[in-house]
Image (cartoon, rainbow, N blue to C red):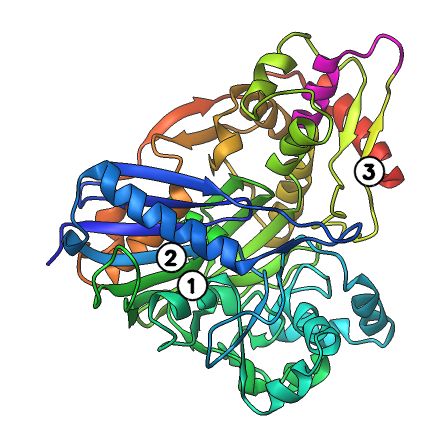
Amino acid sequence: MGSYILSIDQGTTGTTALLLDKRLNIKARVNREFRQLFPKPGWVEHDFEDIWMSTQHVIIKVLAEAGIHAKSLHAIGITNQRETTVLWDRRTGKPIHNAIVWQCRRTADQCAALKSAGKEPLVRDRTGLVLDPYFSATKIRWLLENVKGAEARARRGELAFGTIDSALVSRLSKHSAHITDVTNASRTLLMDLRKLSWSDELCDLFGVPKEILPEIRGSSGVVAQTKGVKGLPDGIPIAGIAGDQQAALVGQACFTPGEAKCTYGTGAFLLMNVGRSPVASASGLLSTVAWRIGDEVAYALEGSAFIAGAAVQWLRDGLGLIQKSSDIEALARTVPHSNGVVFVPALAGLGAPYWRPQARGLFAGIDRGTKRGHLARAVLEGIAFQIHDLVTAMEKDAGQALPAFRVDGGASMNDLLMQFQSDLLGVPIERPRMIETTALGAAFLAGLGTGFWSSKEEIRKTWKVGKRFMPRMKVEERETHLARWKEMVARA
């Protein structure tokens, strides 16, 4: 039995590899960014070959940095950007088009047409999701319609569809496995949320041939073994898979119904464990699968803000206000407040609870006294305002208040953002000692699936608070902030 778990965290802007031992000591961590492609306004793509090259790079480098031989690996866990859609040739493994990223809005008109046709109630009932370009089904349809010959090849079974987890497992196993897990399948608009299987009715609705779909498996347990991967021996079990937000829920040890976490990454995602049955949302949130471990299935309520850390990247790359993302906190602290400037981060439309794909970003309240620091602070506050709206909706749906919630992701290291978030919500914010909870969750699932860890209870004992933020804003000030925010969201 190997001594280490290799966790591959394939995110929207980069791929991270993490090596962990049984006591959760991180032996090494390596990240590699890759290209973001924007062929038209509102369109976002990735070249899957870029993703695969970044994955190979981080695997080789993380082992080298740790000084660990690959034969010491016990298992591999994978977590991934969800909804991002790849179609590839089953024989060669070569994608037929760039991957269409979850942020891409190109199918907004298709979703609007289905809504106008009265199809959204059916979709919500079967999937727990809404009709939005965010999800995979309309992306698949676009590829079938716009790549020459794709429709006919799909019907002949020559093509394979996958979210990024499926595509990585295919490559890691030399195309011997075409699988996905329940968490990723639940984000496609094609899986029946209660039956945990592909729906003929939904496949017909979206025009997706079932011949291209992967087998749905649990989140924990061996699904394939490595074969022909540079830097890795054959036969290492791939034993844990979950979409990034569900993996973070596991990594935050939110195993009890009512426990919740928010991940501040490229987007921001709030998930609450709701137990063994899905909870329908009346507030524009999503019902989704949290995980399947053995015979146990857990569900979650989810609220998504499409733009969080991506807004900071835009300040860096688009406006040149900062040189690196971590500079935003120091810049924001050069002013005591935002001086009335409000930023609505609708750079890729608005997600829950609004679901307005046509919304666009907005700065308001700018005058001649506005400085770079005010803009930086307004961007951070805009992220926090979105999470406030998600929490309010989630408490309404769940019928209970969130006494506190756990945070992770790169932007959770921004103390100014976390303090403002606590102030807006009026509840404590808990940041764990280890914020790599997405990669950690994938590692936990792989370890549980291979006996590396014995139980969820063993994992729970490892979770520790790193820093707690307590609310200190006066109620009147909070209400003033929120009223201004609501006014600006209506304009976006």
What residue is drawn where x is 80% and y is 37%?
361
Main SS of the magenta segment? Answer: helix
Quarter of the image with the C terminus is top right
In this rendering, the count of numbered labels is 3
Q: Nearer the viewer, mark 1 or mark 2?
A: 1
Q: Would you identify the image quadrant in which residue 388 lies?
A: top right
Which residue matches tag 3?
Answer: 489
Q: Is residue 70 above or below residue 29?
A: below
Q: What percent of the width, then of the height, locates residue 435?
A: 40, 35
Which residue matches tag 1?
Answer: 168
Which residue matches tag 2?
Answer: 78
Q: What percent of the width, then of the height, locates residue 188?
A: 59, 69
Residues at badges 1 and 2 in contact (C-beta under 8 Å)?
yes
Quarter of the image with the N terminus is bottom left
Crowding at label 3, few (<14), some or many (≥20) Cα neighbours within 10 Å? Answer: many
Looking at marks 2 and 3 on the same chain, the residue that comes earlier in the sequence is marked by 2
The disc at residue 315 is none
Q: Is residue 313 above or below residue 300?
A: above
Q: Amino acid at mark 2?
A: Ile
Q: Is residue 110 left or right of residue 187?
A: right
Residues at badges 2 and 3 in contact (C-beta under 8 Å)?
no
Q: Which residues are magenta?
A: 367-381
Q: Is residue 38 above or below residue 186?
A: above
Question: Is any part of residue 351 visible from this angle?
Answer: yes
Q: What percent of the width, then of the height, locates residue 286?
A: 62, 59
Whether the magenta-drawn stretch holds residue 79 is answered as no
User: Cα distance, mark 1 to mark 3?
Assistant: 38 Å
Q: Nearer the viewer, residue 398 or 15?
A: 15
Considering the numbered disc 3 on the image, is that residue within a helix, a strand or a loop? Answer: helix
Q: What percent of the width, then of the height, locates residue 392?
A: 66, 42
Considering the numbered disc 1 on the image, is that residue within a helix, a strand or a loop? Answer: helix
Looking at marks 1 and 2 on the same chain, the residue that comes earlier in the sequence is marked by 2
